[in-house]
Image (cartoon, rainbow, N blue to C red):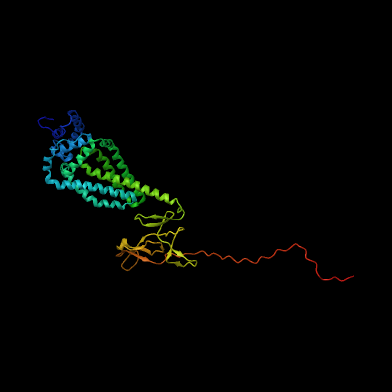
Amino acid sequence: MSTQNPTAVRVYLARVRSALADLPESEVEEILEDVRPHLAEMEAELGDNPKVDALIERLGSPESYAAELRASGGYPPRPAETGDKPAILKVKTGIGGARFAFWGLVFSMGGFALFGFAAAMLLRVEPLLGLLFIAPVLAISVAYVVRRGVASIAELPEVIKLREIVTSFQSNRNGKGLDYFRALKPAWWVLCAAVLVGFGLLLMLRHTEAILLLPLMLLAAVAVVWAGPKLKTDRRLLWLAVPISAFVIGSMFGGVGAAVDLAAKRSYSDGPYTNGYTPYNDTYGNPQLNYGSQEVENIYAFDAEGKPLTDVYLYDENGRPLSTTRYACERYTGEKRKVGDDNRYPRPRVERGVQDDQGNVNGYNGSRAFCQEKADVPFSAAIPKIAPVPPSATPQAPPSSTPAPPSNSTQPTR
């Protein structure tokens, strides 16, 4: 390398050294020795004779990078943060896009955590569809950092304030715990991959349609293992690793909640309702009845002649109503009317299907979905006849063994 034409790494490190000038020289040298190999590797990736601006796009300004090195090393913040002001002025023209990229990352992190929690808590695929509303925001943020880098984002006032808080926390005693967690970063990325794959397999076992989701989980697992170790040298990868980490954390909390809920239900079902009807709540919080492991949606009663009964009210042995909630056809028609949320049976029978223009059910020509309520009983019951007990016959007195008394008739005298 020619000293007359310093490389981008040397220029970048010179500015980092200036930002760390208040620290002891020996410690500054130690810090620079740790980061120099990463910068040299990045310089090689950027091609022949890259410019300093290329490094700034990948890592942010040397001043902000030096502040992160202070935080990671547990050093106090710089006494006078004057070196960052010119940089703020330089990127002020692009502050709108930088701010959108930063808050897009924050928004995506919260959304991924929320929907991961809901999907794991309910063990259903539907909550994950909410990620489709977050994806556009994250995609625009990623496009910005890929094109412009993170330099302008690192100079945002809110980012500088956040960095100062982290640095201050790191410098006191409570921040020592961060060093321990920082040492666990490699294990964390592996754990994220394991949780993603395991969660995908669990959803696939419970819902066959989740098999389409499994490749995405595998791709996310590979991405987080690849991107995690490179965050120190390429801050743009935060927009990949942070949302995935948030999703993993949310799904882990949701899994714990689901396990607690399942344990509570099992504990309750081991009580007096084990062999009969068990009151539960469905996924919407509405009461439901279970017979064994099967959900009971309707109850039909018949008299001794096999005639169906209506307006039957059910109670348990303690006088508690056996109530359930069933909804009408609101999923198909938008109607929000409840079929029943009390203990009155039978409920109207909800029939759904597809019919064509001529009214033929399951037709194909111009077919459309339909939903209707019917009050009829969909089956007939054969009530067993119990034979009446015949009246008992009058009991006969048992024959006596006592000899009969002598007759009063007189016998002729001889």
Identified at 13% across, 46% down, the residue is 94
* Residue 297 spot, x, y in % from top left: 40, 59
244 or 361, which lies in front? 244
124 or 291, which lies in front? 291
Q: How many numbered marks appear?
A: 0
Above/below status of 259 relative to 347:
above
337 or 413, which lies in front? 413
* Residue 407 spot, x, y in % from top left: 80, 69
Identified at 29% across, 39% down, the residue is 188
Asked whether the viewer can see residue 45, the reply is no
Asked whether the viewer can see residue 129, the reply is yes
Q: Quadrant of residue 173?
A: top left
Q: Is residue 225 left or right of residue 399?
A: left
354 or 90, which lies in front? 90
Tell me the quadrant of the picture where the C terminus can be found: bottom right
Q: Is residue 271 left or right of residue 53?
A: right
